[in-house]
Amino acid sequence: METLYIKCIIPFRVIRDKKLTSLEKLILIHMVSFSKNNDIYCWGTNQYFCDIYKVSRQTISKSINNLVKLGYLRSEYDKFNKKNQKRRIFLSDGFYDEIKSIKDKFNTGIKEN
């Protein structure tokens, strides 16, 4: 059995957000772990998330669309390849800034008195 480890920082407001399902929270945590900076998009496809969470493609698609609608994620489509458009998913700029701010606080170290 394969073991998946995810290390990320997530704001407590995400955990408490009643508009998000448990699956959406997991997907969001997963996507935060993929994002080293906001120039890097989530490389996980819907099928990847289906395989990880054992749900249908429709369920994954609905979850990602809800995360976009609620402002946690943003998606872009490849404008140059009309036949096989590829979606790229990023953390929304505001949510990315929030995550970065939390990470920066953890990386400041202990200050001298």
Image (cartoon, grey):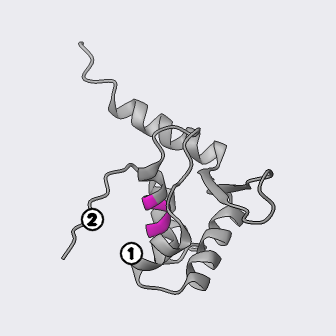
Q: Is residue 33 magenta?
A: no
* Residue 85 on image: x %, y %: 73, 62
What's the CA distance linking mark 2 and mark 1? 9 Å
List the residue tagged with mark 1: 52
Return the mark for residue 10.
Answer: none
Disc 1 on helix, strand or loop?
helix
- The residue type indicated by label 1 comes to Ile
Q: Give the magenta part as a residue range.
A: 26-30
In-image side of 92 versus 35 (left or right):
right
* Residue 74 on image: x %, y %: 68, 55
In-image side of 105 versus 14 (left or right):
left
- The residue type indicated by label 2 comes to Leu
Disc 2 to disc 1: CB gap under 8 Å:
yes
Upstream in the sequence, badge 2 or badge 1? 2
* Residue 65 on image: x %, y %: 67, 70
Within 10 angstroms of label 2, few (less than 14), some, or many (20 or more) residues? few
Q: Quadrant of the C terminus?
A: top left
* Residue 88 on image: x %, y %: 64, 55
Question: Is residue 3 in view from this perspective?
Answer: yes
81 w.r.t. 99: above or below: below
List the residue tagged with mark 2: 4
Q: Quadrant of residue 68?
A: bottom right
